[in-house]
Amino acid sequence: MSNSLNINQSRSQLALIDDEGYQFQENNMFVFVVLEIMRYYPGKQYRRKYGLDHCYFWDAFDVTITDKRYKKTFVLTADERFKKELHPGSVIKINKYSKYPYKASAYCQTVIEELEVVNGELYDITDLKKLPWIPSHFSRQEKNLPLASDRDYYVNNWTFALNFDKLKVDEVLPICMREIDLTKVHSLQDVVNKKAPRSKDQLLIVKVMRKSNVIHFFSPFYDDEWPFQLPLVVADHTGWCTAVLWNKLAVELFNNFQEGSLLMIKHFKIKESFQKKSQYFQTPPQGNVVFDSEICLNQTSVVRVIHNISDADVERLKMPDLECCLITRRDLISVPDFAIVDVAGCVTFVGRIEREPRKDIKYHQKDSGGFYHRRWIHLKDKSLHAPTVVLIYEGYQSECFFNISPGQHLLCRHMLTNHGLSTLQSSRQQRYTWLTTTSNSRIYTVRPSDYDQLPKPLDTVVRNAFTEYRKDEFVNLYMEGGFFTYPPLPCTMEAFIKAVPKYRDQITESGQLLQKFNRMNWRQCHQLVVEAAFLSLNYVDLNKQKKSVINYSHYLCIPYVRINDTSCTKFYFPRTQESEKNELGSIDRDCISQLWSKQKTGNRSRPKCAVVFKWHILNEPITLNTIKPIGLCAESCITECKELISGIHDSDLGLLHAAKFDLNQEEVTAINHSSVKLVQSKFTLLLDVYTDAGNGQLIVLKRGFEF
């Protein structure tokens, strides 16, 4: 967007808003440019004082705006932020705001309650960021601190991770090994058994064996200044034990060390281990002593990362090696469920980025507004033709998470195995194996030049794992983006009930479906169970160029071969203007095309075909458009519409490794005839709903069972 934005320069509009005597009028246009958007969780007292208690979401935003003279930061409610596509550089008009006194000072805090994005283009803000703050600005905004909270940190705009770019904490300097008086160092065994004499100079030197993500334990009802903890597993030559860094110390040290680092600890407390009692705690390898105690560290403790460690120091300390359980794809089959393993391989597939909503069970009446970023990847090694399917979450490895691409070599540490054994009905039934990240997981992107930088013995393990790999060995398998879900769902209602006995509790309640769709954000993904009645279907061939359709239908935005479109005369809700308005699910050609992964340049393009099913939600005036992409097994031959809906012939790996990507004329004819009998039939539908960049919601039909 050009810099020709027309903003009234007769007087600073920010000054008008600050003017106590100014009377706001609805016909006044306060137009501003957004410079920055920062998210956080308001303090309890500020929620009441600033009217945020009535909002559905209990997070808030600080938005810095400018009128091209000055800049200033305002509080923006999350409910209003949710409704608008707001970015740095957006041009906005403020329609409604309120002013509240800040504590006992004369300063008033302005809360934006309604705004309007003038257009979708983004303004160049490079020079605008250099503008001065308005003279009456609040000191906290200049320090990059939240306006509606006494906490001194922001969080990521989508997740719960700390925004370290905006965080100002004291630097923790490392310490050289030669600076430590080894005569004051005690062993873990002596300390936890209370055999070592207690003194202020008591020291511990431990090795970090596992490092978790920072846990952010916030709530709308408490005002902890630094609600963080960093769980660790540490060890020395006498044994292993757990450790926890609390509050600000966890934040200060998080980016200063990794697994394999040596820590010098002073002024600590010994308590009974809470982590070890957790069902998720993984016992260290056999032969290691695990103490029942936990080292507690807070702001009064001294924790320093040790560097410049000589070979003589390593020999004297006798620290244990990092645990490593590197297995191949072939070995993964025999590993028990919920075990912790390490895997390495070449990335052949990287799925789309999805946002999984956080489930706030305790505070179900309020939505925290936070998500987990996740994506599916496939790792290929030489032990087996099948890939290792991995579901990774972002955690605090944002750069690695967003930049994973086909062809990279990855080492994935502390991954949790899943076999879905509870869903098996017989020993002959095929097992599906996949891995997920845990709170202790770490992903290394490794190249030959990086081997020596890995902690021992990981450097040797990785070097051996990738020695026989040739450059671009699996290039024909490289794919990126698109729809992928795993493991495959059961294809019969009986098997589904066995896998999910309480599935009826997951059925979307009457009146909630439209609300759920309206609250979905970009990249948000939902797995829904709904009950609906069949209306019609249409076959879509996305490889053909746009042309006139056979027989008129409202699906004019995509080319297709018409199969059936029978209107329903006796139905639970008659077709009304309201039901047409409440039509969910995009049928746009470009939106549907996003289901298929992009292949490496030079590969032969595969057919892109799908079936659009139209449904009517039971007891609600809502029409649902669902997409069934064609990705079938080699031996499949569909003769009934029910077979297509149930997914009995779907490939286990979906559109990635299917043998058949379209339907022949005989199958189209058979589906056409059988679909007529299904009109008004009721189905339980298992859906995957995804919101794309254009806020179009793509609904994939994974399974459907008639009842």
Image (cartoon, grey):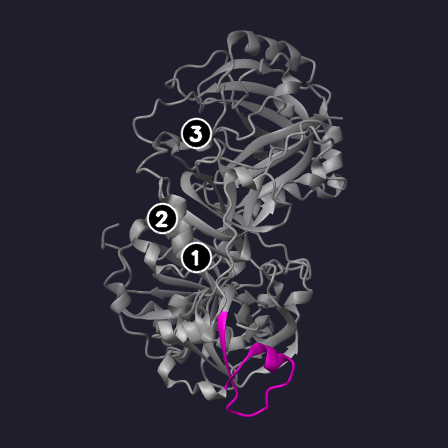
User: In the image, what residue occupies the spot 63% across and 54% down?
Assistant: 359
Q: Residue 647, position in %: x, y?
A: 62, 25
Q: Distance between the residues labelled 2 and 3?
A: 27 Å
Q: Earlier in the sequence, mark 2 or mark 3?
A: 2
Q: Residues within 10 Å of mark 3 (few under 14, many from 20)?
A: some
Q: Mark 1 points at which residue?
A: 397
Q: Where is residue 497 in the image (x, y as percent from the top left)?
A: 75, 35
Horizontal and vertical percent position of residue 519: 56, 48
Say which residue appears at 64% left-offset and 45% top-offset.
Answer: 336
Q: How far apart are marks 3 and 1 (CA)?
A: 30 Å
Instruction: Depth check: give the residue in front, 569 or 158.
Output: 158
Q: Name the residue under label 2.
A: 119
Can you say whether 55 is above or below 12 in the image?
above
Query: What residue lies at 63% left-to-right and 17% top-to-bottom?
Result: 641
Work out whether residue 241 can be spotted.
yes
Residue at position x 27%, y 59% from top? Answer: 125
Q: What residue type is labelled 2?
A: Asn
Nearest the viewer among 640 and 203 is 203
User: Where does the magenta region start and end?
Assistant: 185-207
Q: In which quarter of the image is residue 274?
A: bottom right
Name the amino acid type tagged 1.
Gln
Q: Which of 405 and 568 is in front in this view?
A: 405
Dot 3 corresponds to which residue?
593
Q: Which of marks 1 and 2 is in front?
A: 1
